[in-house]
């Protein structure tokens, strides 16, 4: 299961709460591996302001390939649930809709990186960028500081992705307290994944 959404929508909090409830492996992108964390630091560093959009996409995809090989696939092979804070949807929303790169190219790149692996359920935590901005820290990272227009395009991109695959994506209102959002998330996860009550 994957959590997607814009900056400050509560993905990390909700992913941790659900993983704890399920006893699942909790992971994130970019990151989760030594290689992934080094790429994360580079991509989010404000000093990387001149990073080309294609280079950014390739770096993030490299982190994803390592993530799948080192964390996700081994966990699934052991029969574990996996909850990830971001996955393939973020590449399409940020680098596709946000940066303007061709969606078809990004899909092919991501499919190559994951060897065709994708999430059973994607929960999109939706929150207006203006509200999300109030939740973020005083020192934004490179993506957080990308500007209002960029974040609106990303939000639109996520909505478009969810609308295209309603059977696999679920849109959840990310407004309210963490507990309120967690209850909405659990209702969706329980229904879509046929989980027993925990």
Image (cartoon, grey):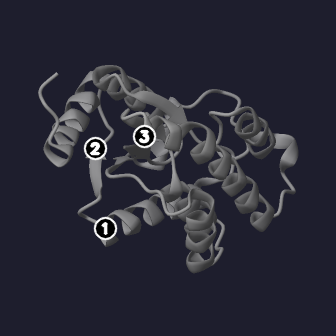
194 and 70: which is toward the camera: 70
Q: Residue at 64% of width from left, 42% of height from top?
A: 30
Query: Mark 2, mark 3: which one is toward the viewer?
Result: 3
Give the secondary structure at mark 2.
strand
Q: Is residue 124 left or right of residue 48?
A: left
Q: Is residue 56 left or right of residue 68?
A: right
Q: Earlier in the sequence, mark 2 or mark 3?
A: 3
State whether residue 9 appears in this view. no
178 and 31: which is toward the camera: 31
Q: Position of residue 132 (x, y in %)?
A: 47, 39
Marks 3 and 1 close (CB-CB < 8 Å): no
Q: Position of residue 83 (x, y in %)?
A: 41, 36
Count of labels in the image: 3
3D distance between C-alphas at marks 2 and 3: 29 Å
Check residue 165 in the rendering and tell me which mark sits there, or answer none: 1
Disc 1 crowd, CA 10 A, few/some/many (<14, 14-19, 20+)? few
- Determine which residue is flagged by label 2: 173
Q: Position of residue 98 (x, y in %)?
A: 60, 64
Q: Earlier in the sequence, mark 2 or mark 1?
A: 1
Q: Position of residue 8 (x, y in %)?
A: 50, 37
- Determine which residue is flagged by label 3: 76
Asked if residue 169 is positioned above or below residue 15 in the image, the reply reads: below
Give the secondary structure at mark 1.
loop
191 and 49: which is toward the camera: 191
Asked if residue 53 is positioned above or below residue 140 in the image, the reply reads: below
């Amino acid at each position: 299961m994957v959590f997607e959404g814009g900056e400050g929508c509560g993905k990390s909090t909700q992913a941790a709460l659900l993983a704890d409830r399920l006893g699942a492996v909790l992971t994130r992108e970019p990151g989760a591996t030594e290689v992934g964390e080094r790429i994360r630091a580079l991509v989010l560093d404000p000093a990387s302001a001149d990073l080309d959009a294609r280079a950014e996409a390739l770096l993030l995809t490299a982190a994803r390939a390592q993530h799948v090989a080192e964390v996700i696939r081994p966990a699934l092979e052991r029969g574990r649930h996996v909850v990830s804070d971001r996955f393939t949807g973020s590449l399409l929303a940020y680098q596709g809709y946000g940066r303007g790169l061709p969606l078809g190219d990004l899909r092919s790149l991501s499919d190559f990186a994951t060897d065709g692996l994708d999430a059973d359920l994607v929960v999109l935590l939706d929150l207006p960028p203006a509200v999300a901005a109030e939740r973020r820290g005083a020192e934004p990272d490179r993506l957080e500081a990308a500007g209002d227009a960029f974040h609106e395009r990303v939000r639109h991109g996520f909505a478009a992705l969810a609308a295209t695959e309603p059977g696999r994506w679920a849109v959840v209102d990310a407004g309210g307290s963490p507990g309120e959002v967690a209850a909405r998330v659990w209702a969706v996860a329980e229904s879509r994944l046929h989980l027993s009550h925990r």
